[in-house]
Image: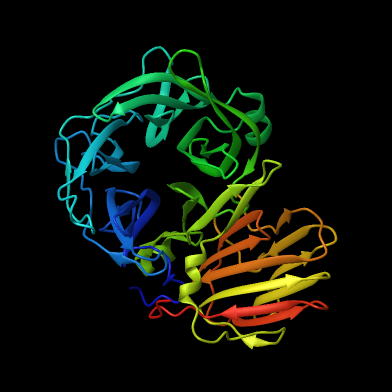
Amino acid sequence: MSNDPNAPRFRVRPPAGWINDPNGPFRWRDRYHLFYQYNPDAPVHANVHWGHASSTDLAHWEHHPIALTPTPGGPDEAGCWSGCVTDDAGTPTAVYTGVDRTHTGLGTICLARAADPDDEQLTEWKPLPTPVVAGPPPGLDVVMFRDPFVFHCADRRWALVGAGHADGTPSVLLYDCDDLTDWRFAGVLLDGKDPVATGVFGDKSVGWECPHLYRTAGDEHVLLVSLWDGDPCSTGYLTGRLESDGQGGLGFVPRAGGRLDQGRDFYAPAVLQEPDRALLWGWSWEARPQEEVLRAGWAGVLTAPRVVDVHPDGSLRVSPAPELDQLHPAEPFVTAPARVPLPLAYDLTVTACEPTTVSLLRDPAGRELTVRADPASGTVVLDRVAWPRTGREGSAPITVHVPKAPELTLRLLVDGSLLELFVADRSMVTERVYRRPDDIAELVVDGPGARVTGWAPDSGRRG
């Protein structure tokens, strides 16, 4: 691993090179598998393979050989792009976007089979030579087509594909793929002309990437899309119902939604549906100058796993996966408001009863990186303006709104430059904050009655 102090040590990322979208979170036997877009040769977005890591506990990850490599002369010779992994009659199967040398922004849907289903580490994969879908359906004027996601509904297997149309309308396309080698276009699941989607997302995106779907505890569904306007923008969610469209397909009827992550350094989330919960990972890109990225030799990281659901009002319910507590050492480094040094990685919980300011970093001029919480107004403000980031959204303070309450609990997972803030169980904020050599990393909590507990993760601890 890199000796860069800003390099995350506990989240999934390769030792060097480029990582972006999480792909195919999958549980096989007693092991979780997580794949990801990967350039093994340089920290730049090119030469896209599928990297692979696995875990028995969601806290400690083991890296494996590259799972998918572009095939010269094949349908994926210009990259093995985003997709998912599904169990096809006992054989783990990757379903992914293949791009050839002559593509014009349109992908194909390709399959790769696990060479040995009895290998719980799934270290060898064999791609099929021919795509199962050669391109978008005719008659819809589709100019963006990628990122298949396979799911089950009404005793059948279906797939979503992200799309954009020539008139600037984004959509999610639906396929019937009960036979994984024989796909049938089953219509448009949802598009950007839907009034609920327009009200939630606006009309700026021209394509919806990485569509994912999960079931809620209340038997609704949540549709996740990554908003693309020629470049990655942000991520959104819609809660609603899957219904028969009367023609052998399905439609999605949304009722509410919002921005999935309130931060500026999060994109392309992927979901693993388990029987009793749904787990989500996202990609956090670099937000520092490219020359610093090249010098460091690595770019990108996947977030901590998050458990996602919805509240009765249709708003997001989210929290870090409880398995992350396995990284806690025997004793916390702080158990009450105090001025204490902060390690490079920490897991901090603060409960505010009154307006409370949590300071995390201080520069030589006395400017601070802070999180301010006010339970009475239901607001949390992350202020990192003294640690500017690259990117078109800038570095202005982020304000999160949640219901007013007598107290408000924040949880901060910081790992190197990756900052993940969870507000109550309703909002998440992912940002990249890079410590500078003369910054002082010190925890200061200012708020009457505030309660604080902080842990420094231990990479060697298991349970």
Residue 341 lies, in percent from the top left, at 60, 86
Residue 362 seen in the current view = no
On screen, residue 290 versus residue 195, left or right, reads left
Residue 255 picture quarter:
top right
In the rendered image of this protein, does residue 189 appear above or below residue 99? Answer: above
Residue 236 lies, in percent from the top left, at 58, 41
| Scheme of colours in the image | rainbow
Viewer-proximal residue, 8 or 30?
Answer: 30
Identity of the residue drawn at 69% across and 73% down: 350
Question: Which image quadrant: the N terminus?
Answer: bottom left
Identity of the residue drawn at 67% across and 41% down: 314
Question: Which image quadrant: the C terminus?
Answer: bottom left
Viewer-proximal residue, 149 or 232?
Answer: 149
Identity of the residue drawn at 20% across and 48% down: 69
Residue 417 lies, in percent from the top left, at 51, 69
In the rendered image of this protein, does residue 229 appear above or below residue 449? Answer: above
In the rendered image of this protein, does residue 421 appear above or below residue 440? Answer: above
What is the number of callouts on the image?
0
Identity of the residue drawn at 46% across and 74% down: 326
Residue 238 lies, in percent from the top left, at 60, 37
